[in-house]
Amino acid sequence: MSNRTLTDLLSQLERTTGKSYAPRTFRERLRIQKSVYLMRALGDRASSRYQYSHYFYGPYSPALAKDYYALRPGSIDGSGVRAVPPNTVHGKRLAIVADAVRRGNDFLEAVVTVHSMASYNPDASKAAIRDLFGSVKEELAEKFEEAWTYLREHGLVEERT
């Protein structure tokens, strides 16, 4: 992704969520990683170039980190971009991510981790994914059902027995 494309995406996310997407603090960088992962899962073409691996705080893309560290300071400015119409595909994706972001970084981390686990284990039952999530993310285990429901509502996981 070009720096301009990443700057535009992060600026749109900032405008849509009301949260900072400048990569200054750990919480902002976590928000970037998880939001771009979620945009990718929702089919955003620009986000699809990033590959993710398992990491302590859920899926992590070293290439994305390299790209956002290369951005010019002050280039992320949600007030400087036009609002994306909510009835467009991109606007709907942004709204889905914004909903997760508003619920907090812990929820966002839970959502992308559950999605990643379900994607890597397509034949696993929901109970098996829950057990795996609980063993890896013990501190977030109580968020599993909410995260699973969120993913189901947005067509990102199918119901499993």
Image (spheres, grey):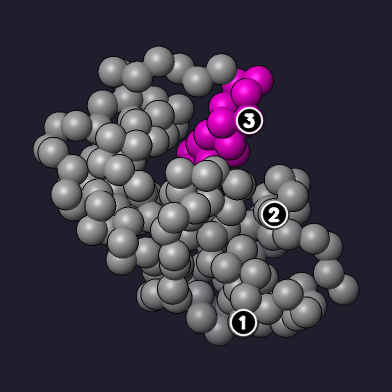
Q: Is residue 128 above or below residue 6?
A: below
Report how far apart the C-alphas of labels 1 and 2 lie in the structure.
18 Å
For this orientation, the residue located farthest to the left is 73
Query: Label 2: which residue?
Result: 156
Q: Quick one: label 1, few (<14), some, or many (20+) residues within 10 Å?
A: some
Mark 2 vs 3, N-terminal side: 3
Q: Amino acid at mark 3?
A: Val
Query: Which of the two discs, 1 and 2, sits closer to the camera?
Result: 2
Tell me the tag on residue 18: none
Instruction: Find the distance from the CA under tag 3 to the CA under tag 1.
Output: 32 Å
| Percent coordinates x, y for residue 37 in the rendering | 48, 55
Q: Are marks 1 and 2 in contact (CB under 8 Å)?
A: no
Q: Which residues, given as a range, are shown in magenta? A: 86-106
Q: Nearer the viewer, mark 3 or mark 1?
A: 3
Q: Amino acid at mark 2?
A: Leu
Tag count: 3
Question: Which residue in the structure is indicated by mark 1?
Answer: 132
Residue 66, image x, y percentages: 23, 58
Q: Is residue 124 visible?
A: yes
Secondary structure beneath disc 3?
helix
Label 2: element kind:
loop
* Chain-order first, disc 3 or disc 1: 3
Mark whose residue sits in front, 2 or 3: 3
Indicate the position of residue 137 as horizontal and vertical percent values: 50, 75
Is 67 within the magenta? Answer: no
Answer with mark 1 or mark 2, whichever residue precedes in sequence: 1
Label 2 Cα crowd, 10 Å radius (few <14 / some 14-19 / many 20+) = some
- Residue at x 56%, y 31% (from the top left corner): 90
Residue under numbered circle 3: 89
